[in-house]
Each structure stands twice: as structure tokens, then as C-alpha cells.
Image (tube, grey):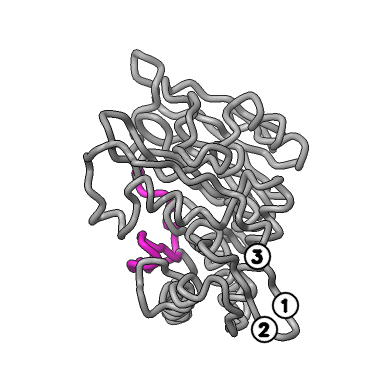
Amino acid sequence: MATVAATPGELAPDGLAMPGPEAAPLATPPGYARHAFAGMGTTVSVVLPARDLDAATAVDGLFATWEAALSRFRPESELSRLNASAGRPFAASPLLLDVVDAALRAARATDGVFDPALEPALRALGYDRTFAAVERDGPAPATLVRGGSWRAIALDREAGIILLPAGAALDLGGIAKGMAVDAAVAELARRGVASAVVEAGGDVAVRGLPPGEVAWPIAVEVRRGVRDVAIASGALATSGIARRSWRRGGREIHHLVDPRTGDSARSALWSVTAAARSCAEAEVAAKAAFVLGERDGKRFLLRIGVSALLVRRDGREALVGGWAAAGDPA
């Protein structure tokens, strides 16, 4: 389990957090350097000892490889070819097998609340291209597409085959990003980097600690600003609607789809930040809790033993599990 503590940020008169002096999600300790690049639809940042900066280029290559294989927006990607082959056996690479296998295990563990086969639902809601190109307003969806087709996906690791049912298509964006962060930290460890942080669009994993420190300082975005978080081990992931929302038929649509309805999840939550042993685990927990809503999301998080920070649309916050407040040890 990740070890985290949340510290209070500066509050505005309405009680909503205001941005602090460090708006970036990662601080750079003395003797460390930051390396940033675009990857998997977001900005990826690596903080590591300045003497190890050359190792950060391996993270660039890793994210480029994962994006080339797993983007649903690249017609030539392996994922796009898998989706186009629905109804027929598809010979998959070890990378695609690993990510699809992890996504199916997550779907089973959440009883389908986390659903990797929501690409048709997202397309029906208008998210049929990269988010930068999505129309920000338009008519209401003609129909909603419920999830659940993941239950009929067959994966044979020994044969290297994935079979999607006809009409099914995968969107692996969130869990693939979390797994890529985990893989990047593992790659830095393999290259002898003793301490580092990798962050990609709110997904954060740490290795070791800076000399003399007891935790890494991370800034987590809340309703109007940031909340300072100290993480000593493990990973964080955030699912929320701060970045990817648009309108259809005069109402808000966002990318966190409830597979039970095929519509954007409707609750009072604005974001969920989960702390877990790995970024992939935190990503699944955060997304499932958001889709379930505050009451059922809390119950789910407590059942699986994952700590979290829940932020409501009105700015109020709730802590779940071992996440400590006001700088108390987690």
C-alpha cells in the first residue's frame, strides 16, 4: 500500500483550495533534475538525481512504444487493429496481452464497474477522436451504449491470442497509462536509479526517497487549486472531470462512463485520488470509485483496502482509509 499524508492548502473564503506557489505536480529537490515530454495524450514528468538524468530518456522511449501500440486514436496501432478484428482471433504482442489481461482482471475485481470495453460508449458520447479535436458542443447522443462486452472477451496467453466479440472495442487509456508509469519506474530501477518520481496526467509512482527526506511532495489538483500530498512509497492516481468534459444536447458529458448506463457517471464527485502499491491499481480504484459515487465509492475503497481523497463538485473533501489529514503520519 502507498504511504501518504495530505497537508492543508491555502483556502479561499468559500473554503475551496487556492493554488499554492508550486503549481506543478512534482517538486524538484536539491541535486535532482526534471525531464518532461509529451506522451499518451498528456505531459510526462520524471524527477530523478541530476547525475542520472541520461536514464530519463529511456522513459521517453517506453512511453512512445506504449502509445504506438495502445492508442485507440491511431489507426495503425495494435489496439486499433485488435478492435477492427472483433469477431476474429487476433495474434497479440506480449505488451498488448499484458495490458488487456490486467484490464480484464480489473474488470472482474470490480464486477465490471471498471470496464475496458467502453470504446463504443465513448464514441456514442462524442469522444471519437483525440480530446483536443472533440467537438465541445453538439446534439444529444442518438443512443447510449452500455458496457459489459468485456465478459465475452477470450484471452489465451499461451497461444498469444485475443478474441473480442463482434461489435466490441477496447479503450485501454487509463490503465495503460498507469501501467506505463509503473513500467517506467521499474526501468529506472533496472538502470540503477535509486530514487525517482514518474508522473503522467495525475498518475504518479515513486521509487526511493531523496537524501534526508521522509516523503516526496506531490501537488494534487482539487476543485480550485492544489492539495499538498506527501507520498513515501507506492503510487497515486486521479480520476476526475477537470480536463475532459464537453457538452451534448445542452448537458455536460465527460469521459468517465458508467458502464451500467452507457452515460457519463452522474454524481456529486469532481475527482478521486487513490493511493495504492502500483499506479495501475490506483488508477482502477480511482476510476471505479468515481463511477460508483461518493457513498458506494467509499464502501468499495474500504473493501479493497485503498486510501483515497474524494473531492466533491462543491469543493468539499473526504478522506478514505489510511489517508491522513493535516500532515499526520499515514
Dot 1 falls on a residue whose secondary structure is strand
| Residue 318, label in figure | none
Identity of the amino acid at label 3? Ile
- Coordinates of residue 225 in the picture (x, y in percent): 36, 33
Q: Residue at x 51, y 56 (%)?
A: 174
- Coordinates of residue 268 in the picture (x, y in percent): 48, 24
> Mark 1 sits on what residue?
156
Asked if disc 2 and disc 3 are in contact, CB closer than 8 Å, the reply is no
Dot 2 falls on a residue whose secondary structure is loop
Identity of the amino acid at label 1? Asp
In terms of depth relative to the viewer, which is nearer, 272 or 322? 272
Q: Quadrant of the C terminus?
A: top right
| 189 relative to 68 in the view: left or right | right
Q: Answer few, some or many: residues within 10 Å of disc 2's Cα (few below 14, many 20 plus, some between 14 and 19).
A: some
Q: Residue at x 44, y 42 (%)?
A: 144
Between the C-alphas of marks 2 and 3, the distance is: 14 Å
Query: Which segment is the magenta one?
Result: 22-46
Q: How many marks?
A: 3
- Coordinates of residue 73 in the picture (x, y in percent): 36, 67
Dot 3 falls on a residue whose secondary structure is loop
Q: Is residue 83 above or below residue 145?
A: below
Identity of the amino acid at label 2? Gly
In terms of depth relative to the viewer, which is nearer, 229 or 80? 80
| Residue 153, label in figure | 3
Asked if disc 2 and disc 1 are in contact, CB closer than 8 Å, the reply is yes
